[in-house]
Image (spheres, rainbow, N blue to C red):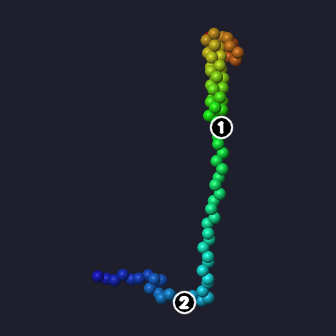
Amino acid sequence: MASRRRNAKAAAPAKGKKGAKAAKPKKTKQPKQAKEIKPGPPVEVVAVILTGVMLIAAVVMLDYVKGTKYGTGMFFAGSYEANS
């Protein structure tokens, strides 16, 4: 079997270092400060807001149906008379 050639850098002998440097001390890790977890809004507040939005959407939908089918209502009255 043929032998493999070694890398020139790996085969070269280590040279002596001029003026050896002192080893640097390892840095110690400082403990991280715990982040404050701020609580979100309570469940009751979310339920109140969601209920209010749903009620307003229901009123607008009913007014739309009244305006398109019967020509009455607060917002959509008379806006669809030209189509029928």
Distance CA(mark 2)–CA(mark 1): 68 Å
How packed mark 1 is, by other alpha carbons closer than 10 Å (few <14, some 14-19, many 20 or more), is few
Q: Residue at coordinates 65% horizontally, 37% vertically from top-left?
A: 41
Residue 14 x %, y %: 50, 87
* Amino acid bearing label 1: Pro
> Can the viewer see residue 81 in this picture?
no
Q: Which residue is mark 2?
A: 16
* Amino acid bearing label 2: Gly
> What mark, if any, has residue 41 been given in the picture?
1
How packed mark 2 is, by other alpha carbons closer than 10 Å (few <14, some 14-19, many 20 or more), is few
Q: Quadrant of residue 2?
A: bottom left
Residue 76 x %, y %: 68, 16
In the depicted view, which residue is nearer to us: 13 or 9? 13
Q: Residue at coordinates 44% horizontally, 85% vertically from top-left?
A: 11
Residue 29 x %, y %: 61, 66
In the depicted view, which residue is nearer to us: 30 or 6? 30
Residue 66 x %, y %: 63, 13
